[in-house]
Image (cartoon, helix red, strand yellow):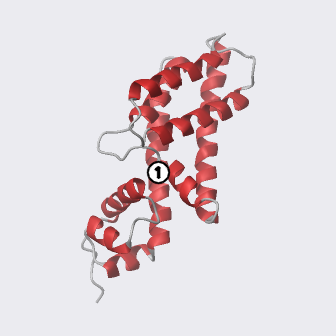
Amino acid sequence: MARSKEFEEAAVLEKAMKLFWEQGYEKTSLNDLVEHMGIHRRSLYDTFTDKHTLFLKALERFEDRIGSRLAAGVKQSGSAGEALRFVFGFIIHGEEDAPAGCMLVNSAAELALRDAEVDAKAREAFAGTERLLAEIVAWGQESGEFAKRYGASELAEYLHNALTGLRVMTRTTVAKEKLERTAALTMRILEP
């Protein structure tokens, strides 16, 4: 008779995600994972196959978590400008009880050139963020809140690049006020 799992898979995946987010893939050992997740090595292999598969599942969890929070915040916004300020604020200030920065950006920088699966996940997530930004820009252009000098897709690429830089900077000791000034200046390209 097979033993039942003595842990909640979603809960241990959340713990693994936060550890990978904080330390990166290479620095995180199997011993680190087993200890942090509070499970046995055999359970890790039985449930997630190997470290790489666990990492990919953690990336998916991160993407789902952040993507849904961004989409919800944008949906609650009363204007395109408010939505964009929400996105920049979320990127700069993050969430309570979460590592600084962006797990996808960190992982892309660490692994994308030598790991096709990580590269594909990062590109897919980045494309999703650009689509969200393009929707916000188009909303603002249609309402007259944003200029139409550039297309929504072009501006989304530009804004995503700025957000990526901010995500990297949030892992440093740079003051949040400086990042907020950078975000405000970045958004001025949209002014009519």
Horizontal and vertical percent for residue 122? 59, 52
Q: Choose top left, top right, bottom left or bottom right for residue 192.
A: top right
Q: What kind of residue is marked 1?
A: Met
Q: Residues within 10 Å of mark 1 (few under 14, many from 20)?
A: many
Q: Position of residue 65 (x, y in %)?
A: 43, 47
> Is residue 76 in sight in this rendering?
no
Left or right of residue 57: residue 135:
right
Taking the spot 27% from the left edge, 83% from the top edge, the residue there is 3
Q: Is residue 170 left or right of residue 136?
A: left
User: For this view, does 177 lie left or right of residue 161?
Assistant: left
Residue 10, image quadrant: bottom left
Task: Judge left or right: residue 82 versus residue 22.
Answer: right
- Depicted 59 relative to depicted 178: above or below: below
The residue most toward the front is 173
> In the picture shown, does residue 53 fall above or below 138?
below
Q: Nearer the viewer, residue 58 or 180?
A: 180
Q: Residue at x 75, y 17 (%)?
A: 149
Q: Of helix, strand and loop, which one carries label 1? A: helix
Q: Residue at x 56, y 19 (%)?
A: 185
Residue at 44%, 28% (x, y): give it: 89
65 or 191: nearer the viewer: 191
Locate residue 159, reporting x and y percent. Answer: 61, 31
Of the 4 image quadrants, the one containing the N terminus is bottom left
Residue picked out by circle 1: 103
